[in-house]
Amino acid sequence: MFGPVWTTLYIMIGTAGWRVWRQHLPGQQDALRLWGWQLLANALWTPAFFGLHSPGLALVVILVMLAMLSRTIAAFRTQDRLAAGLLLPYALWSCYATYLNAGFLWLNPG
């Protein structure tokens, strides 16, 4: 299930970034910078959770990612409403992943 979901989400994330990149409107660079930072945070979650076996660190990473993602959506909305909308399923899925991460931490405190 995770493979097809993430494949679809990454296509939508990439499409959203492309739509904003081609706009050339004021604020575009800031919006794309946020987009890149939230993608970096996304990429750091897997090594934090699985590589370092640190659900606490992973929870911090995903919460930072969600904060940056919400700012990215707001910035994208000023550039291209469809681009912002394309990020909403990713935000929902990330909220679900945050819930699972927090639940794992709660059930496995040590």
Image: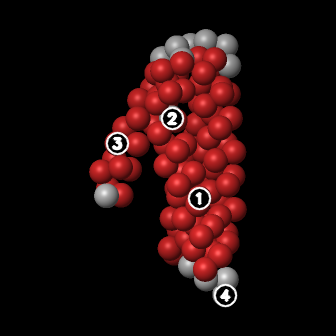
In space, the residues marked 4 and 2 are separated at their CA atoms by 34 Å
Of the 4 image quadrants, the one containing the N terminus is bottom left
Report which residue position mark 2 lands on: 87
Crowd tier of the residue under label 1, counting other residues whose Cα lies within 10 Å: few below 14, some 14–19, many 20 or above: some
Query: Residue beneath label 1, please?
Result: 98
For the residues carrying marks 1 and 3, which lies nearer the camera in this image?
1
Query: How far separated are the C-alphas under marks 1 and 2?
Result: 16 Å
Type of the residue with mark 4: Gly
Pick whichever of labels 1 and 4 is earlier in the sequence: 1
Quadrant of the rendered image containing residue 49: bottom right
Q: Which mark is residue 67?
A: none
Would you say residue 93 is visible in this rendering? yes
Please name the residue shown 69% across and 62% down the image: 60
Report if the CB atoms under discs 1 and 3 are less than 8 Å apart.
no
Going from N to C along the chain, the mark reached first, 3 or 4, is: 3
Badge 4: how crowded within 10 Å, few (<14), some, or many (20+)?
few
- Residue 59 screen position, x and y as percent: 65, 64
Q: Amino acid at mark 1?
A: Thr
Q: Earlier in the sequence, mark 4 or mark 2?
A: 2
Q: Which residue is mark 4?
A: 110
Q: Residue furthest bottom?
A: 110
Q: 43 or 86, which is in the foreground?
A: 86
Q: Disc 3 or 2, which lies upstream in sequence?
A: 3
Tag 4, which secondary structure? loop
x and y, in percent, of residue 74 in the image = 66, 28
In three-dimensional space, the C-alpha distance between marks 1 and 4, rounded to whole angstroms, equals 19 Å
Mark 3 closeness class: few <14, some 14–19, many ≥20 residues within 10 Å: some
> The residue under label 2 is which amino acid type?
Leu
Vertical placement of residue 96 versus 19, above or below? below
Question: Relative to 61, does residue 54 appear above or below in the rendering?
Answer: below
The residue where tag 3 is placed is 8
Indicate which label's residue lies in the foreground, 1 or 2: 1
